Amino acid sequence: MATSKKSRAGAAAEALSADSAPASASAAAAPATAKRKPRAAKAVAEPTPVSPPALAEPTEATAPGVAPARKRAAGKKAAAKPVQTEALVPEVELAPSEAPAEIAKPSRSKGRRAAAEPVPASPTLADVPATPISDAEPVVAEPAGAQRAAPTESIAARRERLREQRRGGHSQAVIAPVRAETVADLVAEPVDDDKAAETPALSSEAAAEQRPAARNRRRGRGRDHQVQPVEERSPSIDAVDEVTEAAEAELPAAALPAAPVLKPLPEAPVAPPAPARFRHSKVGGAGLFGGYTLQALEGDETVSITLRGAAPGYYHCSCAAFAASDEGRCAHSEELLATLAVQGEAQRAQLQRGFAPLHSEVWLSAGAERRLLLRAGSTAPEALQALSAELPAEGLSAERQVDFGHWLQLAAEAGHELRVDAAVWTQLAHGADTMQRVLRLEAQFPHGPAEAALQASLRQPLYPHQWEAALFAVCAGRALIADDLGLSQRATALAALQLWQQQFGLRKISLLAPLDRHPAWREEADRLLGGWPEGLELLTPATLESAAGAKLLIVDAVQQLSEVASLRPLDAPALLLLADRELLGEPLLGELVDWLDSARRGPWAAWRSEGRQAAKRRQRELLATVMLSRRKRDLLDSLPLSFETLLPVAVPGLALDAAALSQLQALQVRWQTLGFLSASDQLQLLQALAQLRQQAVGDAACAAKAEALLALLPQILPAQANKLVVFAQQDASLSVLNAALASQGLPVANLRRHQSLEVREQELAAWQGEDAQILLASDAACAGLDLVLDDVAVVHADLPWNPAQRAARLQRVAGAARGLPGWQMLASGSLDEALLQAQSGAGASANWPAATLDFEVAAMPFLQAEALQGLMTALAAVLKWLSPAADAP
């Protein structure tokens, strides 16, 4: 008898499990189960046997709400089998007046049984499919063949939820072992006969196997198997959870029965997907691929999209956001793809496969580099299909036009249609234009910077490295010049401008420069081009709108730009950016490369992928097609002793002496007519020249130069050098400069003609040491002294008549170094302006005897033969710049 009680207790314990085992286990397994789960057996009161009515034939169905017994053999767990249940009501027909009997379920409270409270009877299981019951919410019938999802609520969470419901007085029912007749009472929604009919019927063999198990379950059925609301009595929640937890722990996951479709709990409303912002329509046919037009629902924005597939690069939008996107995306394309993708699995798969027409196509990819993509059509020749299959996923570089030509040739030979997108031709045109410029310049100037015709295109010669930069800028079309020389690029830009106009016919050109640099640009244009070039407009950041429509845009001092984006609307087909220093390693360089490579030909992609973190040498290599940034040490062999910058100085009231100028012109005519000048004529000539030159070094001119020097010092020290030497021919000129510097408290060393050698050596030691940064030196006082010093700059306060004397100044300071930063002061409107032009222009090869013109002591004023010839040739060059009328007839 005790064994029988244990068997019934074990069976009842397993009947409480939420995830049941197969119901075909034998009744003998019940005692063993009770022994293995003593806690679970104690938690459930022993049911009272009740003789059930006659049973109908069993039917096969899953009944996860009832925990069947387990089948074991030789101590091992039996494999899971489908749950089988029987109809628990007799198959009898009731008269319409007969009401179904009411059943009751007693409540349980610590071993005591409460009186059963009748509840309305429910429909039979034959009318309602067997469905599990959730103790949290009503249950909805499950369609046939539905798969059960793994339970998502843990045992601990379920136990806590049930405790909270008890404390809060919820009216939900806690389910004890349930008779099948009561299932329909707990269904939240009506169940129709069609759903009930979906319950599969058992085969005759399976039914025979199920009869013994069914009889055992009927013997244990009694009035305990009833439902009672929680309001009156409820079983122990802990006991129910322990039984459920024990059953779930032993049951393999694969053996769990299929989950029902449960009615979801009320949840917070889920935000609907973002509403559509565009209305799309197909253009040119009803197929999935091709052209689309998107019209904004709000506003008048309209864009066009070409769709060949869902993969990046296989669709293109006409909007500016898509063109600027490095990922090839925009809001229009994303919305169109999302709209098409939700219109069925077949259409989504078609989008992934992409367009597969009979003809072949070539188009541009999107992203940081626009590359050529080839899709061979189904009728394409085998060779073209092989090339399409071998093509990298990112496509072919647009610079490889030879390969593109091969595609066209293969298609033409096979008579196959190969369609090329219009954007492809635009991209190919960039590379073709670059090649055409290179070939034309090579044909015109085969010797490059050393070509005589190139030098003759300007009024003043340029250094080879300057011509090299100008040629690079024109060939590249869009370029950045940022040498590590610390010098202005004005001469380079004007040389490039001259090439653009003379060789390629550019007329509308805009030059954007800081306002304080405008005078220097105009003076440089006068020196190199003889005036302001036609078609060149000089702008400031405040007048940017005037640059619209320019064919060439030149931007000076880009290292001072605080925001490059504001200049992007000024984009022109040709672009030249100038920097006074190297920009490698600076964030600004990335913004400039983005601007230069607006066509996305490759430099921007190289910068994004590697350039940001690369070393300077690697950055030069990656940006070699758009940037020229040379180090000073790499150009030493071609650099001059000094890179000189002209510093014009306005002198109040300065005007050339008309009488002295007229006398010079008359003597020049006499020389050209007779080829002879007497000693008296030579003396008059030298006196007139000295009078004109004195105007450039007089007191008024020296005072103006002192002010200019004070304004220049912040640009030199310590920006470009740590030491500065100022040269002049006369001690008087240096005295004015020394007084101006001393008034600012600047430590200055002086080398003067009247000083002894010992004093001069002390002054030189003070400058070369730490006592002074500035040295004022006259040409005569420097004789016999070594002024060589590293990191030094030079300023010429006047202009010697003989160019050799100016070169001697530089040699004293530079030694073996080259490329010293230097400035040449010139009194505006004086003879020195014409003298400098003559020295670097047509009179560069003339013999310039010093004589008294360079204020040499005891210089012979009378010249003979070749010396006189050299003087008159140099004078002719000077007078040519002063007055074109002075040319010989």
Image: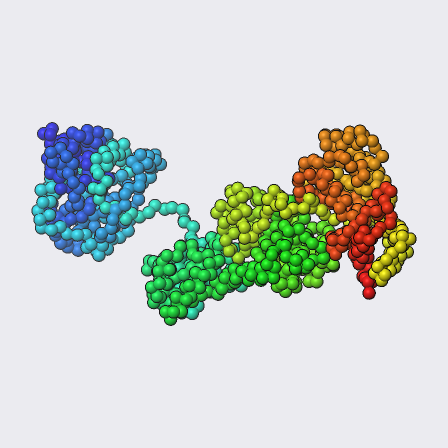
Q: How many discs appear? A: 0
Residue 810 placement, left or right of 20: right
Residue 269 placement, left or right of 694: left
Q: Which quadrant of the figure contains the N terminus? A: top left
State the image coordinates of residue 63 (x, y, percent, origin top left). Answer: 20, 45
Q: Is residue 675 above or below residue 725?
A: below
State the image coordinates of residue 507 (x, y, percent, origin top left). Answer: 66, 64
Relative depth, front residue between 756 and 343: 756
Q: Is residue 495 visible?
A: yes
State the image coordinates of residue 274 (x, y, percent, origin top left). Answer: 45, 54
Q: Residue furthest front?
A: 865
State the image coordinates of residue 269 (x, y, percent, origin top left). Answer: 41, 49
Q: Residue furthest bottom?
A: 415
| Residue 402, image quadrant | bottom left
Q: Which quadrant of the figure contains the C terminus? A: bottom right
Residue 220 placement, left or right of 718: left
Q: Name the residue located 21 percent from the left edge and 37 percent from the top edge.
A: 251
How did the renderer colour the structure? rainbow
Q: Name the residue located 28 percent from the left edge and 36 percent from the top edge.
A: 232
Relative depth, front residue between 164 and 157: 157
Relative depth, front residue between 707 and 485: 485
Q: Name the residue located 60 percent from the left edge and 56 percent from the top edge.
A: 447
Relative depth, front residue between 375 and 66: 375
| Residue 265, image quadrant | top left
Q: Is residue 288 visible?
A: no
Q: Name the residue located 51 percent from the left edge and 48 percent from the top edge.
A: 622
